[in-house]
Amino acid sequence: MRSAFFPFCKTRRGCDTMEKTVKELAEILHGTLETDNPGLIISGVNGLQEAKEGQISFAVPPYVEVAGQSKASALVLPQNEKFVGRQAVIRVDNPRAAFAELLLLFRPPEEVEKGISQYAFVHPTAKIGKEVAILPFAYIAADATIGDGTVIYPHVYVGRHVQLGTNCVVYANASIREKCVIGNNVILQSGCVIGGDGFGFVTTDGKHTKVLQTGNVVIGDDVEVGCNTCIDRATVDSTIVGKGTKIDNLVHLGHNDIIGENCLLVAHVGISGSVTVGNNCTFGGQAATVGHIKIGNNCVFAGRTGIIGNVGDNAFMSGFTAQPHTEWLREVANLRKVGDLVKKVKELEKQINALKSKD
């Protein structure tokens, strides 16, 4: 159902005045409370340095030992970590995960009013689910499908025959090209392009002729794609991003790539075309690959690693070209000694020349 130009969002009721006792927070986080004042009121959450009186923060090693200097009234800390400070303490197994829960509690995301703005374009053949929000100036093309509970922000383009799952969020200026398939609970950040043409050309007599890119992109459930990231459609078949994978800003995935489940790709990563990546792999910032290679499961590539060949399971690699991380560390350490070695060689040459002159 279309509505007028409705407000883009509204703050959840009461989130600005949320108050909980530390005892209540310990119960919410399934943690163990250490304090003489379980009725202490907490009204906000913040970083360790930024926190003020009445707020809660968290710390993990090596910051636990200095966490007592924070102005926060309460802290979420790991189990069995020694702590000296005045704050109330909630002990949990994973303080980072607990902090994420606190952020949702004290700073919940703004709600978007459900409905289709009269200023959005939705083709009559598009299938729109229940409780969907389509904000002004979004464009939903023919035969597209939008799942229940999905939110589409202004200036989003959803192409023909796109299938967009339930409870997705597509932020402003993102584009989902024709025939792409997006799973459930997917977040597409502003400016990302899903299904742009793969970089395919045939060169004859110095002239580059475009090869039609006829495939699509398939993104699994619970994937997040960062701002201005580009995932190219396959030449044929599909470029695939597995369930639970998280992709940072300014990442490029080439055509026909297959990225496994629960991978992490940090900013500026570049995966060339026709690369297969296993599950649970991490690519540090600016890591890149050549095309047509296979990478196993549970691999880690440090920032700026250049991957030029197949990699097996459980590898931890660094450097250009990629090599085992410990070898790369050894090389870097040795390189730092080169200056001293050169000086020592020059001194030895002088001593040798002096001995020769005596003869």
Image: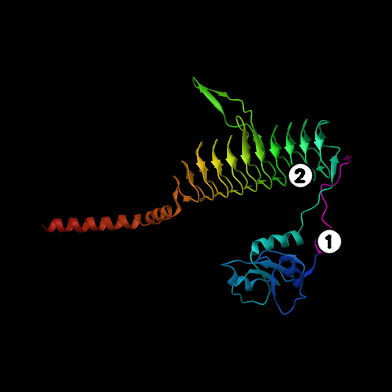
Residue 221 in the figure: left or right of residue 300: right
**Disc number at residue 299?**
none
Mark 2 or 1: the one toward you:
2
Give the structural element (helix, strand or loop) at label 2: loop
Q: If the image is split into quadrants, where does the C terminus sit?
A: bottom left
Residue 278 visible in the shown view: yes
* 184 over 332 or under it: above or below: above
Residue 72 visible in the shown view: no
| Residue for badge 1 | 14
- Residue 107 included in the magenta stretch of the image: no
Marks 2/1: CA–CA distance: 27 Å
Residue type of the residue flagged with mark 1 = Gly
The residue under the point 33% across, 58% down is 340
Give the structural element (helix, strand or loop) at label 1: loop
The residue under the point 80% across, 61% down is 16
Residue 337's spot in the image, x, y percent? Answer: 36, 57
Q: How many neighbours does mark 2 have within 10 angstroms: few (below 14), some (14-19), or many (20 or more)?
A: many
| Residue for badge 2 | 166
Residue 354's spot in the image, x, y percent? Answer: 17, 58
Q: Earlier in the sequence, mark 2 or mark 1?
A: 1
Residue 146 in the figure: left or right of residue 240: right
Q: Residue furthest top?
A: 205
The region drawn magenta spans 1-17
- Residue 12 included in the magenta stretch of the image: yes
